[in-house]
Image (cartoon, grey):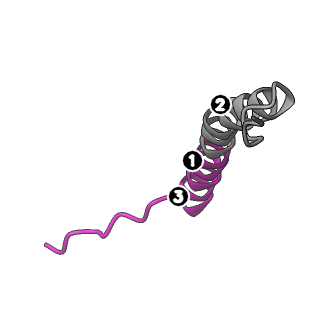
């Protein structure tokens, strides 16, 4: 008796890969916004308060 080779459904695996790709991209976007965003905000705040200006005597 020969065993039948089972074929996976290609459309199912493709849709799963697309969903994983979208999840990875959205996760990267969220990490970028919440990681880099506050740093840029702090720099702008400190610059507006004169933190980066040399002290005058």
Q: Alpha carbon of mark 3 to alpha carbon of mark 1: how far?
A: 17 Å
Q: Is residue 14 magenta?
A: yes
Q: Alpha carbon of mark 1 to alpha carbon of mark 2: how far?
A: 21 Å
Position of the N terminus by quadrant: bottom left
Q: Residue furthest right?
A: 48
Q: Is residue 27 magenta?
A: no
**Label 1 crowding class (10 Å Cα cut-off): few <14, some 14-19, many 20+?**
few
Position of the C terminus by quadrant: top right
Looking at the image, residue 49 sits to the left or right of residue 34; the answer is: right
Give the magenta range: 1-25
x then y, percent, for residue 37: 72, 34
Looking at the image, residue 10 sits to the left or right of residue 4; the answer is: right
Give the label on residue 34, or none.
2
SS assignment at label 2: helix
Foreground: disc 1 or disc 2: 2
Earlier-in-chain disc, 3 versus 1: 3
Looking at the image, residue 52 sits to the left or right of residue 11; the answer is: right
Give the label on residue 20, or none.
1
x then y, percent, for residue 35: 60, 36
As displayed, is residue 45 above or below residue 28? Answer: above
Earlier-in-chain disc, 2 versus 3: 3
Earlier-in-chain disc, 1 versus 2: 1
Q: Residue furthest front?
A: 57
Foreground: disc 3 or disc 1: 1
Of residue 9 and residue 36, the one placed in the foreground of this image is 36
Looking at the image, residue 9 sits to the left or right of residue 48; the answer is: left
Instruction: Identify residue for label 3.
Output: 9
Q: Quadrant of residue 55?
A: top right
**Label 3 crowding class (10 Å Cα cut-off): few <14, some 14-19, many 20+?**
few
x then y, percent, for residue 53: 77, 41
């Amino acid at each position: 008796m020969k065993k039948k080779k089972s074929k996976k459904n290609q459309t199912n695996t493709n849709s799963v890969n697309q969903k994983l790709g979208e999840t990875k991209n959205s996760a990267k976007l969220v990490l970028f916004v919440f990681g880099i965003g506050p740093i840029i905000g702090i720099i702008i705040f400190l610059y507006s308060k004169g933190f980066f200006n040399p002290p005058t005597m």
